[in-house]
Image: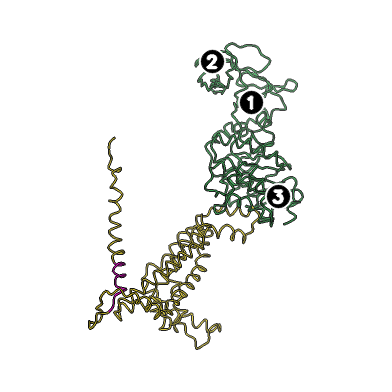
Chain colours: A green, B yellow
Amino acid sequence: MADKAALHGDLRLEKVTKSYGDFTAVNDLSLTIPEGSFFALLGPSGCGKTTTLRMVAGLEEPTQGKIFLGQNDITYTKPYQRPINTVFQNYALFPHLTIFENIAFGLRRRGIKDVKEPVEKALDLVELSHLAARKPTQLSGGQQQRIALARAIVNRPALLLLDEPLGALDLKLRRQMQIELKWIQKEVGITFVHVTHDQEEAMTMADTIAVMNEGEIEQLGSPADLYDNPKTAFVANFLGQSNLIKGTISGNDGDNHIVDLFGQKISLAKNRSHAVDNSIYAGIRPEKFRISRVATATSGNILSGGKIEDVSYIGVSTQYQVLMPWGQELMVFEQNDDGVAPFSVGEDVNISWEAGFTFGLRGDEDAEAGTEVNPEEIIEDDE
Amino acid sequence: MVKTGISRPGTPYLLLLPGVAFLFTFFLWPIANLAQTSTQTPIAGGDTGEYEQSLRWQNYIDAFLENKEQFGRSFLYAAIATLAALAIAYPLAYAIAFKAGKMKNVLLVLVVAPFFTSFLLRTIAWKQILGEQGFVVPVLRDLHIISPATTLTSSAFAVVAGMTYNFLPFMTLPIYASIDRIDPRTLEASGDLYANGITTFRKVTLPLSMPGVVAGTLLTFIPAAGDYVNAAILGSPQTKMIGNVIESRFFKVVDYPTAAALSFTLMAAILILVTVYIRKAGTEELV
């Protein structure tokens, strides 16, 4: 076991498939997670993210494919032979051991005699030194979460896996832990792989996010990439909200497509279009829209003939539903920062936006993909 | 403030009344009676079974000294039967809890199934099983594990085997209950933290199942130490246990004071052993 410390490097999954009978949880997944990064696997319940994590941990064996850590093939090594530790969803602390012994568990199993110093350091890191003598049941959820983290980190693994680690915490504590986790990751420099269904959590913490759906990776990139230029309707809807308007590419203008949306023309940068033929969905995030009473000429795109259907004032912004002539309701979030009186229901308005914010999706996609799942509702187990 | 029926101060006591009345009539009163009997002496010139109170504590010492051997045997047999039952029940309970899957409930019913037959009948059945006509003795003889002259009935082996069998469910069920409560994720966490299967069992599964092991051993050892049915049916005069002595003093010799003194001594001995055991087995290791 001494060579475990020498095992490090990028984590590489090559064409990994995991099937349970007829059901394919993970389908031909290839992925490289660079050493030292904070990587998030994001997706709805049942998308295969937890299965992927468990295969990396060694708790499940892939049906096909290989998993490498640096140069070493770890596909079939036992969990206790991998330099990988996991923070489990419900922490899985040992109820019969004190907090100190919980954290010392991994060190003792590796035959390390002097556990006092590393354990105390780990407790310091999570700021719970005063609880060393307690039993897990005497701790609050947030404290248990930190102990689970300390118990994993104390081993200085090459890779730390976090399985929905904040799922059981309340919103406020979750926000605080997101910031702390990010800080701790920087502090210890270990590769973190974080599984979550919470897009906000993934975006707050991760350098790179892989959005998973039905056992496959839909898109991989930085949080800003994924949000600004989603490749699929699923990503567009799962990460934040999107307005997807059906249209046809009717012409080209330099680096831009001219897109016909129910008779109105807009422009869309060619390099932001993922359409494969003339059929396209033009996507615009609700906060990119501006509403105006008169059709002012702007440099950007404009859609006219809207009618305000619904107004909800939520402090920092006002959310509008605008009914367009072709019967679609568009979502518009306006910052309440310009002193302009809010629009009222029934007003006739135009919608405009900077042309550069538009993204294009394949016209044969399901525009509703990724919307039916409300991530806030799923707090319990995945798969 | 409106007084509701629930907040009436007397209600809890009223609810306790049936239980207390039962305990008093069928436990405290007989125990006091037994204590009273234990220091009696025969009435001079009276009939058999006629005793008077004379506070003769010497009864205890006499009773114990006369039956030291049976006392020792009772605890020895009970201890062996408990260990044997533990050795059988633990893997069984582990398999039912972790490996049985859909068969779980069926297997649990099978564990309890012997209770549908009378205790006496089941014990008598063991006489058949271990008898010359049973399958055990010929097989063991063929395998040269026992000599052709050895019989298994009317032996210490038969008594211990009977006790092990009869008390097995009492060992299995509490162990099953505590293993079943173990969160499988703690076992995964142990593997994740560099413990192999054996270490995980030693450091996580076993300590977490200790409440069941303690409960199971107590539920087996206590009745086994006082048992007389197994020794009476499967044993010989050489395997008499203290339960058999008490039984014969009460019902055959009609020596009530000695039987009562033996009962109290047995009770005290079990209490002391159990207390020491619980202290040792460690409330500290328990959750």
**Which element carries disc 2, helix, strand or loop?**
loop
> Which sits in the foreground, A179 or A116?
A116
The answer to which image quadrant residue A285 occupies is top right
Which residue is denoted by mark 2 in the rendering?
Answer: A342
- The answer to whether dots 2 and 3 both sit on one chain is yes
Estimate the spatial distance between the alpha carbons at disc 1 and disc 3, rounded to whole Å: 38 Å
Identify which residue is drawn at 69% across, 54% down.
A114
Q: How many residues crowd around disc 2 within 10 Å: few (fewer than 14), some, or many (20 or more)?
A: few
Q: Which chain contains the residue that carries disc 1?
A: A
- Name the side, left or right, on which B41 lies relative to A237: left
- The answer to whether dots 1 and 3 both sit on one chain is yes
Which residue is denoted by mark 1 in the rendering?
Answer: A282
Amino acid type for the residue under numbered disc 1: Ala
Query: Mark 3 or mark 1, which is nearer the start of the sequence?
Result: 3
Amino acid type for the residue under numbered disc 3: Ile
Highlighted magenta segment, given as a residue range? B30-41
Residue A48: tell me if it is visible: no
Amino acid type for the residue under numbered disc 2: Pro
Query: Mark 3 or mark 2, which is nearer the start of the sequence?
Result: 3
Q: Is residue A40 magenta?
A: no
Query: Mark 1 or mark 2, which is nearer the start of the sequence?
Result: 1
Q: Are marks 2 and 3 in contact (CB under 8 Å)?
A: no
Which residue is denoted by mark 3 in the rendering?
Answer: A67
Please provide percent x and percent y for residue A181. 64, 39
